[in-house]
Amino acid sequence: MKKLYILSALLFISSSFSAQELFSCYDEWKKVFENRGADPINDGDHDKVVVIIRTETTTDCYTAKVNVKGGVIIGTALYFDDESYEAVEYQFKKAMPWSINNGMSRTRITVDDEMITIMFTDKIKPKKKKLKSAPKPNFDLN
């Protein structure tokens, strides 16, 4: 009987958590890019991107605009609620190009141990078509 109460309590607790709470915005966006892929990123300004800032304990996703030149991110700006934006310069631990692959930037680590990734959400490829299943027969074969 005691085991039944413990099992019921565990089941109740686990059902109170939704899948939404278990995955961060980074995990959700990354899965979309992995499943669908992305078109190549052209040089110039891109204003439909997501900047993801992760630490050991938090993940925050912000809308932003970036400038790309030669397949490398050279400038970033974060949007505010009123659609204005402000340029942001990160201080990274290692000097390396901020390259882009499959619509996602290389994750770079700041001097404050923040992991910064940029995702070009407007370059996500459309969802792949599924084959249509045939209907089951609805007549009597006997």
Image (tube, rainbow, N blue to C red):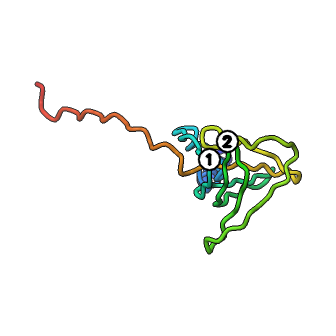
Q: Quadrant of residue 100?
A: top right
Quickly name the residue at label 1.
Answer: 43
Give the residue drawn at x 59%, y 51%: 19
- Answer with left or right where residue 20 lies relative to residue 69: left
In primary-sequence order, the first of circles 1 and 2 is 1
Residue type, numbered disc 1: Asp
- Front one among 47 and 131: 47
State the residue in front, 102 or 22: 102
Q: Residue at x 59, y 44 (%)?
A: 41
**Residue underneath mark 2:** 70
Q: Marks 1 and 2, Cα distance to the nearest angstrom?
A: 6 Å
* Residue located at (70% from left, 48% from top): 73
Q: Are marks 1 and 2 in contact (CB under 8 Å)?
A: yes
Query: Looking at the picture, which amino acid does disc 2 mark?
Result: Gly
Q: 6 or 13: nearer the eye?
A: 13
Q: Position of residue 1 (x, y in %)?
A: 64, 47
Q: Position of residue 103 (x, y in %)?
A: 60, 43
